[in-house]
Image (tube, rainbow, N blue to C red):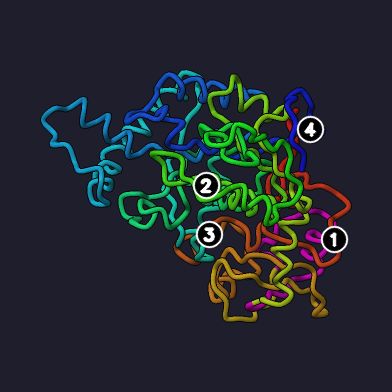
Amino acid sequence: MSAQDSESALVKDRRDRLVVKLGTNLLTGGGENLDIGLMSELVAQIATLIGEGYEVLLVTSGAVAGGRRVVERRPGIKQPRSGDVPGRQVLAALGMPELMRTYDSLFSKHDIAVAQALISRPDIANRQRYLNVRNTLESVLQIGAVPIINENDVVTVEELEGDVFGDNDRLSASIANAVNADGLILLGHEEGLFTADPNVDPNATRIELVEHIDDAIEAMAGDARDGRGQGGMRSKVEAARMATRFGAYTVIASGRTADVIQRIANGEMIGTRFEPTTDRVEGWKRFLLTGKASSRGSVTIDSGAAKAVRFGGNSLLPAGVIRVDGPFDRGDNISVLDHAGTAVAWGIANYRSDEIDRIKGVRSDRIASILGYGYGPEIVHRSNMALADGEPEQQPTDGSTAALPGRTRRR
């Protein structure tokens, strides 16, 4: 790690899928209500990046503050008690529509649609729900909209008490992992991680670069919370640890720094940057390759499908499946075998074993008519698959395929 005063150095790797997290204290300026002017500036930065070809997912706090805004605007509503959990849940319930209306209004000025996603810990911990989250967010990005994500404060008591994700810090890291993001940007009122609390120690120095999170880094993070939000520097460092393990760089910075999102995306060293501890592709493959030990079942595929998966970068479609061995559930890690029983790949199943048995050998457009529903045309999507023998030599060439695990660069 290094502590430097200069912010002029540039990071060589410029990335194209980002998760941006906006904290409560940033969005309120330390007050009770949302700072609409600042939100407008941050949205404008995100819109600029999208125009340059980036994909951005926004994890936002501020539902409780939005609720206060609703109450103040409507004097007939009795002020809930914000000091206890039920009161904060009421404010969150009032504030979530207000928060989304605000974001929708701000993004619409840039002709960008938004999609709300309320996600809690069980949605990430449960394999099937995790797969649903991942697929939905991917689909929202594909149509050019911005997913706006928050934990469901209305029903998640633990989050309001600070015991779940920690003011959306760890939630944002989980989202970054789920969508295989290139970078995670955590914006609050802090200018980064310091060697000591700068509010107490005038000699505290900002840590510009962290290559490995060790006990010393965790000690610097301390236990302090950031005012009105439930997070703090410790939860941000924990989020950085989660994201960097899967190959995403992480930056902790002040959201009030001019053009902060654009400058970080362009590689400028602002705040504290945490380097990924593994290559992004390798991090995701490492997760998928746990199928070697944790496979819940398998599908056997014909020679044409095996060739398409091995060398064409293709997803696995039902037409190529000739046998199913289970039982396994949607979201389980399964083995993909060729007709000789040799592992071709491991991946996350998009359908249960009994469902695959019913649709094996048929075209994808017949799935819904056979099952009465569908979760997409693939048995295993290419972005949820790791090859047993490494990467294919050729990249995908049509809409039914996807390179593992990222996207084609558009700049």
Left or right: 1 in relation to 132: right
Q: Earlier in the sequence, mark 4 or mark 3?
A: 4
Q: Quadrant of the N terminus?
A: top right
Q: What residue is drawn where x is 21% and y is 27%?
A: 72
Q: Secondary structure at mark 2?
A: helix
Q: Residue 169 got which mark?
A: 2
124 or 113, nearer to the observer: 124
Q: Residue 43 placed where, x, y %? A: 51, 25
Q: Earlier in the sequence, mark 3 or mark 1?
A: 3
Q: Nearer the viewer, mark 4 or mark 3?
A: 4
Q: Nearer the viewer, mark 2 or mark 3?
A: 2
| Structural crowding at the residue carrying mark 1, measured as other residues with C-alpha within 10 Å and reported as few (<14), some (14–19) or many (≥20) | few
Q: Residue 344 placed where, x, y %? A: 80, 69
Q: Dot 3 corresponds to which residue? A: 130
Q: Residue 390 got which mark?
A: 1
Q: Which residues are magenta?
A: 296-320
C-alpha span from label 4 to label 2: 23 Å
C-alpha span from label 4 to label 3: 32 Å
* As drawn, 330 above or below 23: below
